[in-house]
Image (tube, rainbow, N blue to C red):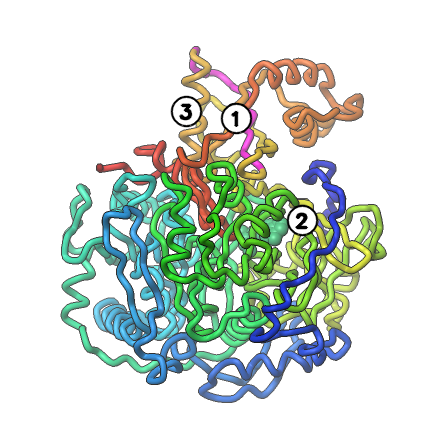
Amino acid sequence: MPPSPPPPPSPDLAALWPEEGLVPPPRRLAERAHVPDRAALAAFRAEDFPRPFAALADLLVWTTPWRTLFDDTRPPFWRWYEGGTLNACTNALDRHLPAARDRIAYHWIPEAESESPRSLTYGELLERVETLAAVLRDDFGIGPGDRVTIHLPMSLDLPVAMLACARLGAIHSVVFSGFSARACAERILDSGSRLLLTADVYRRGGAVLDHKAKADATHALVTEGGGRLEAVLVFTRDPDRYASPTPLHPGRDRLAAPLLAHRRGARIPPVPRASNDGLFLMYSSGTTGKPKGCLHGHGGYLAWVAATCRWVLDLHPGDVYWCMADIGWITGHSYIVYGPLLSGVTSLLTEGVPYDPDPGRPWCLARRYGVRVFHTSPTALRALRRLAPEGPGADRPPFDILVTVGEPIEPHVWRWYHETVGGGRAAVVDTWWQTETGGHILATLPAADPMRPGSAGPPLPGLEVAVLDEEGHPLPPGAERAGTLVVRTPWPGLMLGLWGDDERYVRTYFGRFNRDPRSRDWRDWPYCPSDGARIDARGYVRILGRIDDVINSSGHRLGSKEIESAALEVPWVAEAAVVPIPDELRGQAVGLFVAPGPGVPDDPTAARAEVARAVVERIGPIARPHQVWIVPDMPKTRSGKIMRRVLAALVAGRDPGDVATLANPEVVVALAGIVAAEKPAPPREPGAQTPGPGGGGGPTPGDGGAGGGARGGERAAGGDGEGQAIS
Ligand code: PRX
């Protein structure tokens, strides 16, 4: 294993806020909570690893029981519940029938209030899944282990498509709908999918966007990249009406509706899969330009999301639950599709940005449907608080649990969520986790644990975490210093690996603190999520931000390298460097420095726009730079490395520190002048953009975001990487 350079906790970590006092959990929740107090989970002692995790397998229905609880024969590729077989779709749907056949699984809420919601019961959902599974199997030859790329917006077709793949044992790879054709093609090429599921149009930010045009561009890029996309299956937003101005390509594009009509009523037996076979791929940004295909499996992943839905979200069959994230991110996979369906709840699924243009609408919807558990991101909360600080008012929805995910939440935003949204009666649960972890890792248990505003809380029962210093020594709880978070115990939800890149998996997540690559002992392989953190005297962990080159904007993980390589595709851009801009609404926004070579346009506004457009085209509106600075040179080390740290300090208004060792220290003064003269514009008002928890919890206006916020960006984006607005 090549050595992994140990980055010290970055000085660019988010600002620290003073430690807040503890807030007791609402006592009334204990009456019906799955976990009324910590004693209820006393069996989950990290010292007893892995034994307590055997109980989680009982939350699932198995076709064949497992034989080995924790297989450690190939560290750190841990395998759970080996020998068992099961089907994810059976667990999500069939098991609830017939007892709950008529219970609503999803209420789909269209963006426009004038349109009627559509609902599907568990029974109807299973029928739709089987019909689509028949089409996938019999019309497209999809079978176990095949990869299927799904580039669908927030419609009922999206969970149906995921579950149809799962039923057949195929691996779904959902690409967030706001991602560009380039991003989609890259994921198709990496996963080797031969079928793309897409849609004609969808609504966001009041506009109807042409999504099918992206599928055409995706197909061309896949072909150019040496891949082979055999077919494109096109769903229509409105039944039986193809609304895209982009024509269907004969022989390649197939409309879903007639194929589904032909197979209606088909019964497709679920294909049992081994516990450690792949269930889905979810790509995530990292340190290099190439997104990582995180492969999640069946047994471990499903057991972990089922357990965390009980422990952390306290979901009970029949509860009404609303997570404002987009299914296109991990939050949506775990906590809109698999977890809630395993738990038998009724979920709201919302198109577009539910609080744009009316910031009171989320509370109206929550009231109308009787939402008990509400789940969103700090970015969405900041936007809602700014647009309508009064929150839901006295006629409050019946909230018991208010969840947040994706980014650190500032204590004042936390308090607004707790007091103004929840009336002080609901538990606020700040959940820390990642695409890679499958489900929650740090969180307070809503009925059992005191909450600390601004702190994600303790590890879940059975897990042990630590914050390590540069040498890998744990910082004592209560230490004043920041360090690097690690999860010391393995857990069932951890991904199986990175698609086609075992070496990168080991290096990225375990290389930093493993001292003996030959060790077979799991204690030698702490999982390193690349987050800086502090641990308080109670063992609660406060996340400070990424320590790698990842920017967290509206809860979306954006790889600096991906954005830089997009900028470098502009012919006159010689060098590019991305830094985070502190942003009141999004947490961080993207700042991009470019040094031009020959051919730079005379008009700096046009030059900046060209660079921004290249980024949106390459990745999508979520990565749109908030500010592009065209600079004569970059600050560099003597070996020629760009010092992003210096640029980040200038942008954040901090002292760039000692620059004397740079190869070109004089450039720092010039850069400081340019940054001061071209201050980033204030964040756009959420109403003018889109909300959404990014990887995390809810949409954010303007970024095309998951749960966190995608709209504004998309609205502004017609024709530059986002679907073209057609009305
Ligand atoms: O930096 C952490 C931040 O989001 C990263 C994971 O992003 P992603 O894989 O897209 O998954 C997001 C949704 C689970 C983490 O490394 N993050 C996530 N949750 C929190 C957080 N930062 C602070 N507090 C959180 N609750």
Residue type marked 3: Glu
Q: Amino acid at mark 2?
A: Gly
Residue 185 visible to the viewer: no
The span picked out in magenta is 588-602
Q: Given this view, does label 3 or label 2 mark the residue nearer the observer?
A: 2
Q: Quadrant of residue 727?
A: top left
N-term mark: 3 or 2: 2
Give the prevailing secondary structure in the magenta stretch: strand
Q: Residue at x 60, y 34 (%)?
A: 580
Please tell me the numbered disc located at residue 610: 3
Residue that carries the numbered disc 1 in the rendered image: 682
Residue assigned mark 2: 454
In the drawing, does residue 573 fall left or right of residue 533? left
Query: Mark 2 packing: few (<14 Cα in 10 Å), some, or many (20+)?
Result: many
Please state which of residues 554 and 62 is positioned toward the viewer in this rendering. 554
Q: Residues within 10 Å of mark 3 (few under 14, many from 20)?
A: some
Which comes sooner in the sequence, label 2 or label 1? 2
User: How far apart are the alpha carbons under marks 2 and 1?
Assistant: 24 Å
Gap in angstroms between the C-alphas marked 3 and 2 = 39 Å
Mark 2 vs mark 1: give the one in front: 2
Give the amino acid type for the residue marked by disc 1 in the picture. Pro
Dot in front, 3 or 1: 1
Q: Position of residue 665 (x, y in %)?
A: 74, 18
